[in-house]
Image (spheres, rainbow, N blue to C red):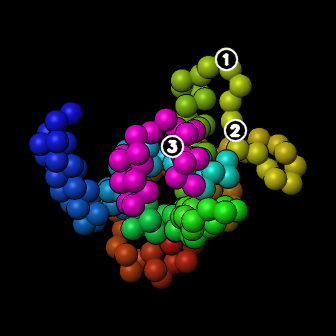
Amino acid sequence: MPTQDYDRAMTVRSRARTRALEDTCAIARSLGVLADPWSFLIIRETLFGRRTFAEFRDSLGIATDVLTDRLGVLVEHGVLQKVPYRAPQQRTRWAYEPTPAGHDLNIVLAALQQWGAAHLPRNELTVVPTSAQSGHPLRVAFVDTEGRSVSQGDAQFSSTARSDIEADPDRRSS
């Protein structure tokens, strides 16, 4: 892609990202940060213990300029944090560690994995979320404030004022 076309595409994406981050909808704001598949794949790689630029680049086959951009956005919005590390007889470099906000995306990735396994199945080895204690597979589900599972057919999205969420601690995860 010629430089001029690339610059134009980045400007359009930047404006779209800015608009999304200013939206009243939390889903739109989330997509302002996690706007592309690479962001989700980078976060997935952190679940496998990968932390360095080279590890992300090598495991994903991502272009270095795209990886630099995505890591910058994830750091800027508090999903990852940069921490210095130094390999023996090497200069200090940066590793990328998930923040609490980054760890909270585990459930989003698990929901995407669950959806893909159900609707885009493959007869190959796959990765599934499992309990660290029992080793049993886990499933993402809607749960009410009393801890009861709610069927997907009974779940709905409702508009509410921020003050209503803040008054009810059980609704803060919305």
Percent x, y for residue 114? Answer: 60, 37
Q: Report which quarter residue 36 is drawn in.
A: top left
Quadrant where the N terminus is found in the figure: top left
Q: What residue type is labelled 3?
A: Arg
Label 2 sits on a secondary structure element that is loop
Label 1 sits on a secondary structure element that is loop
Q: What residue type is labelled 2?
A: Val
Magenta span: chief secondary structure: helix
Nearer the N terminus, badge 2 or badge 1?
Answer: 1
**Label 3: how many residues lie within 10 Å, few (<14), some (14-19) or many (20+)?**
some
**Residue shown at 40% from the left, 40% from the top:** 63
Q: Is residue 169 left or right of residue 9?
A: right
Residue 57: mark in rendering = 3
Nearer the N terminus, badge 3 or badge 1?
Answer: 3
Q: Give yes or no for contact between labels 2 and 1 (Cβ–Cβ under 8 Å).
A: no
Q: Residue furthest top?
A: 123
Percent x, y for residue 163? Answer: 38, 80
Of tags 2 and 3, the one toward the viewer is 3
Residue 123: mark in rendering = 1
Q: Is residue 13 depicted above or below 123 in this figure? A: below
Percent x, y for residue 43? Answer: 54, 51
Residue 36 shows in the view: yes
Q: Mark 2 points at which residue?
A: 128
Q: What residue type is labelled 1?
A: Asn
Q: How far apart are marks 3 and 1 (CA)?
A: 27 Å
**Residue shown at 67% from the left, 52% from the top:** 49
Q: Does the magenta stretch include residue 60?
A: yes
Q: Give the range drawn in magenta.
A: 52-73
